[in-house]
Each structure stands twice: as C-alpha cells, then as structure tokens.
Amino acid sequence: MPASPQPPLDDFDRAILKHLQRDNTTALRVIGEQVNLSTAAVQRRIKRMQQGGAISANTAVVNQEAVGKPITILVEVHAERTHIEDLDVLKAQMSIPEVQQCYYVTGDADFMLVIVVETMKAYETLARTLFYENRNIKWFRSIVVMDRVKVSLDVPLG
C-alpha cells in the first residue's frame, strides 16, 4: 500500500517514536501512560505514522555474533560507469543478504557498504563475485571493523 502524505509530527508523535525506537514491543498502554495519551490515541497515531511513512518497518535487531556473523566490513566502491542504468544495475547487485546496508554517496566512492560475514574467507569469496568479477567496479577498498563502538538505527528526534 503506498504511503499517504505524512502530516507534520507533533510532540506526542515524537515521544511515541522515541519509545518505539527503544523497544517496539512496549505495550501501547505503557507508551500512553508515558506520553499522557490513551491507548487508542497511541494506536491511531502509530497507524498514521506507519501509513505516512514515518515508521518504515518494525523489526528485531539481531546480535550478529550470536548468529555466527561476527565480522563487519565497511567497503567503499567506485563504479567504472555511472550512467543511471549502470547505477541501477549496481544497486540491484549490492542488494544481497550479506550487504547489511548500502549507501549511494558523494565523494571518491560511489557506494558505501556495510557487510557482515562469518569469516574472512567468506568475505574473500563474496568480494570475488561482488567486486573482482564485476566489470563496472573500478576499485573498492575494504575496512575491517575492530570494534563496534556504537551501533544504532535510532533517528534523533530532539
């Protein structure tokens, strides 16, 4: 279902979003008590924010070490050709499960990727197919993460 236009967020909406960003399984009654709204009002506001696109997903944040993917690698990718059709193909190629996040960026690189893998050998295999064998990749640079100091999907809401 396409998102309907999102009306401006008010203080109640922002307060609800802060709670949901911390834990989206919090009971609506508890959120309502914290933001001084009824459970029904909280539910209506959440539904409106989902339909309007302010809330784009409800998901669990998985501990990558607990599921056997302890290695995080940041990869800068520079494309050989940047015509819109070529970029669309690259975007599709970068949208594989091992690529946790993919950003089309400005600067020296065209894309920044966040990749999670179980071993360096697994990354080597992935890099071979994703980068080395791709005729539209001019260069790429891998940066292995030594420690995830802060990882968050929270959007600052003021």
Image: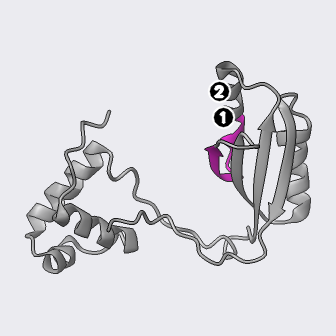
Q: Amino acid at mark 1?
A: Lys
Which residue is found at the position 45% from the left and 60% from the top? 59
Residue 36, disc: none
Dividing the picture into quadrants, the one containing residue 92 is top right
Whether residue 126 is visible here, answered yes or no, is: no
Residue identifier under label 1: 91
Q: Does 98 lie within the magenta span?
A: yes
What secondary structure is found at the residue carrying circle 2?
Answer: helix
- Label 1 sits on a secondary structure element that is helix
Residue 72 located left or right of residue 123: left
- State the image quarter where residue 65 is shown: bottom right
Question: Is 68 left or right of 43, judged from the image as shown?
Answer: right
Using the numbered discs, state the Cα–Cα distance from disc 2 to disc 1 in whole angstroms.
Answer: 5 Å
Magenta range: 93-104
- Report whether residue 110 is seen: yes
Residue 49 spot, x, y in % from top left: 25, 51
Q: Amino acid at mark 2?
A: Asp
Total marks in image = 2
Which residue appears at 62% of the width and 46% of the height? Answer: 103
Mark 2 surroundings: few (<14), some (14-19) or many (≥20) residues within 10 A: few
Return the residue nearer the eye: 19 or 75. Answer: 75
Place of residue 130 in the rendered image (x, y in percent of width and height, measured from the top left): 82, 41
In the depicted view, which residue is nearer to us: 38 or 106? 106
User: Which percent across, then down, holds residue 77?
Assistant: 78, 43
Q: How is the rendered protein coloured?
A: one colour
- Residue 88, which numbered label? 2
